[in-house]
Image (cartoon, grey):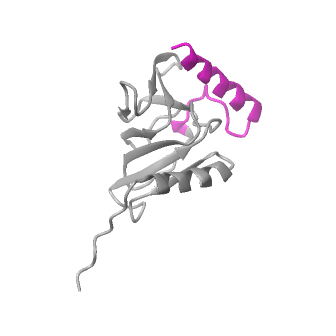
Amino acid sequence: MAVKPKVEFIDRELMTRVAEEARLSPRLRKNYDFHRSTDEPINRLINVMHRGTYVPVHRHLNPTRSESVALLKGRVGVTIYDDEGNLVECREVAPASDCVGFDIEAGVWHGLVVLEDDTVLFEIKQGPYAPIVASNIASWTPAADDAVAVENFIKELEEKFTKL
């Protein structure tokens, strides 16, 4: 008997369900993986996030990874930095805007701020899954356990995008 291929649809029901799970998460975000194993050579997922979620400025250098992201719902601000921590580019990304996604080469310092609740990103990354190591987190970004610094950092980023 042939094995039926796995088919999943990215529909409103899935995005709503994962958004509710994200809302209950301390990190205000939740992944839903389409890959069957994190060991697969390509990892595919939706990442649902709410305002206030913290994504430290980071890069994917150890191991070397690129990532591609398309926004399905909501709005984010993407920030790109040089090696000294200077902001070199910032761009708002939203499904109905002129910029609906981004592709980031390995080694590029980048950050993301969620500008709208129930934001849904579709991400494609090289596998196997590898958690971000300390050397891939920018020294100028707040430590995740410093709640006050994180809140101020997020507010500062949000303000950048209200002025665009």
Prevailing SS of the magenta stretch: helix
Task: Give the extent of the magenta segment.
Answer: 135-164
| Residue lying at 65% horizontally and 36% vertically, measured from the top left | 52
Q: Is residue 159 located in the magenta-colored stretch of the structure?
A: yes
The answer to whether 158 is drawn above or below residue 145 in the figure is above
| Residue lying at 75% horizontally and 35% vertically, measured from the top left | 147
The answer to whether 2 is drawn above or below residue 101 in the figure is below
In the orientation shown, which residue stands out farthest toward the bottom?
Answer: 1
In the orientation shown, which residue stands out farthest toward the right?
Answer: 148
> Where in the figure is residue 60, as x and y percent of width and height?
44, 39
Compared across the picture, whether 77 is left or right of 150 comes to: left
| Residue lying at 39% horizontally and 56% vertically, measured from the top left | 128
The quarter holding residue 50 reads top right
Q: Quadrant of the N terminus?
A: bottom left
Q: How many marks?
A: 0
Q: Is residue 148 located in the magenta-colored stretch of the structure?
A: yes
83 or 17: nearer the viewer:
17
159 or 68: nearer the viewer:
159
In the orientation shown, which residue stands out farthest toward the left?
Answer: 2
> Where in the figure is residue 93, as x and y percent of width and height?
44, 29
> Where in the figure is residue 43, as x and y percent of width and height?
38, 54
In the orientation shown, which residue stands out farthest toward the front?
Answer: 12
| Residue lying at 61% horizontally and 25% vertically, measured from the top left | 140
The answer to whether 164 is drawn above or below residue 97 in the figure is above
